[in-house]
Amino acid sequence: MSDLNAALAGGAPEEAAFLQGSIAHVRGREKWVLLVSMTAVFFVLLALYAAVLAVLLPNQIQALDPANKASGLAVVFAITSIFSTLTTPIAGALSDRTRTRWGRRTPWIVTGSLVGGLCLFAVPQMTSLWAITLFWVGAVIALNSMQAALTTVVADRFAPNERGTASGFVGAGMTSGLTVGTIVAGLLAGTITFAYWLFAGAIIVVCLAFVAINREPKVEAALPPPFRASEFLKSFWVSPREHPDFAWAFFGRFTIYMGYQGVITYMLYILQDYIGLSLADANRTIATLSTITFFALVFAAFTSGLLSDRIGRRKPIVFASSIVMGAALTVPLFLPSLQGMLIYAALIGIGYGAFMSVDMALMTQVLPKADGEATGKDLGILTTAVNIPQILSPVFAAWLLSLSGGDYTALFIAAIVFVYAGSFFVLPIKSVK
């Protein structure tokens, strides 16, 4: 760890003059090993997030205080998402500066997974809202630090004309992870402690396996300049006037996730209060809906990523996927029943799967700097377009439900507006077709 501290201060040991994990594109078998193992990590990570956010935390909080479950859930999500939003770009920027014999990204992946997993082991043991929040915050900070480093691998190791395929695989892993995590958590909702421990152990295992089989290459590069807090903080401002494509990508991603997460976060309560299911039936139905979504999104993610590389275009797929997501959110408005939710599950799987498969590739192509020196920081900033909705959407949804007297119709309408707005924000991007 002393090597890492020295690196961040600009005084790394001589061997760290080699930039590890920078622009060194993989080929052949190594590429496929990297791609499959990275997909596996994202699969487990998103399964963990889906399990905790959609099933485990809502059940745990409802058991603590059934009368205030919605507001309690919003408080936990808002607090943890603030830390999540701050962590991602900072960790990404620090990983850009890191110089160790193990690489730039590896120390963050290992440390983040270990600390995050240990914090997650503690969450089910907590018996108050604030204790749950404290340990979940710790897990989120650690796991987001790991994710910030891992996300840069797509830009670090894959050539631009291969990033659609890479994004498609990772997107399929992420979206299928969301589905499988929800299914597994729904099935294990009666044994919450075991469910938390299962996902905590899984993220540690896959991350350690990833760094063991994917050693970062040494690429000769200059050491970073000495660390200065003022310059470090200034680096997080990316001028929309100088880099409009970066800004459009940020706002497009932000609004689409505002719409998507606002509904997903409250799915358990939607099934209970809007559709009319019991808690037990709602948990089982989440597993059913997630299974439908799983098959739809895996198909959409793989085909969209490959199609994107073949035609050399990203924007049309992002636009079309957003339209499909909006259509999915419309169904429960006109068919507020279990049948309507089944149709929603299929359409949201197609739309979200296609969106995630191409979104990451698009993000790597609008970065202000193409030399790899600020990839972690810039992708971290774009990741806040996902994290900020985690703060705002639960609070915004709780506010809407309060105004409407618990009518989820308002939530669906707002989600549709956000998703459709996001589809149009990607159109002005000029550097990506």
Image (cartoon, rainbow, N blue to C red):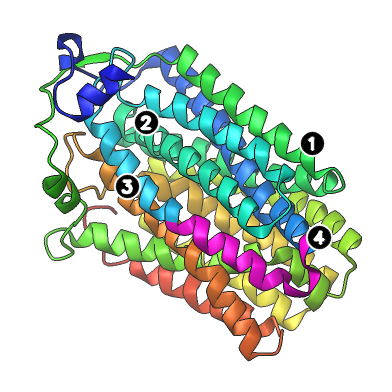
Q: Is residue 395 magenta?
A: no
* Residue identified by numbered label 3: 89
* Residue identified by numbered label 4: 63
Q: Residues within 10 Å of mark 3 (few under 14, many from 20)?
A: many
The amino acid type found where label 2 is placed reads Val
Pointer 4 with pointer 1, Cβ within 8 A: no
- The residue segment tinted magenta is 64-82
The amino acid type found where label 4 is placed reads Ala
* Residue identified by numbered label 1: 194
Q: Secondary structure at mark 2?
A: helix
The residue under the point 34% across, 29% down is: 158
- Looking at the magenta stretch, what is its main secondary structure? helix
The tag earlier along the polypeptide, 3 or 2, is 3
Distance from Cα at disc 4 to Cα at disc 3: 35 Å
Left/right of residue 318 with respect to residue 301 in the rendered view: left
The tag earlier along the polypeptide, 3 or 1, is 3
Distance from Cα at disc 3 to Cα at disc 1: 32 Å
Q: Nearer the viewer, mark 2 or mark 1?
A: 1
Q: Secondary structure at mark 4?
A: helix
The amino acid type found where label 1 is placed reads Phe
The amino acid type found where label 3 is placed reads Pro
Q: Residues within 10 Å of mark 4 (few under 14, many from 20)?
A: few
The residue under the point 17% across, 43% down is: 369
* Residue identified by numbered label 2: 153
Left/right of residue 148 with respect to residue 351 in the rendered view: left
Q: Nearer the viewer, mark 2 or mark 4?
A: 4
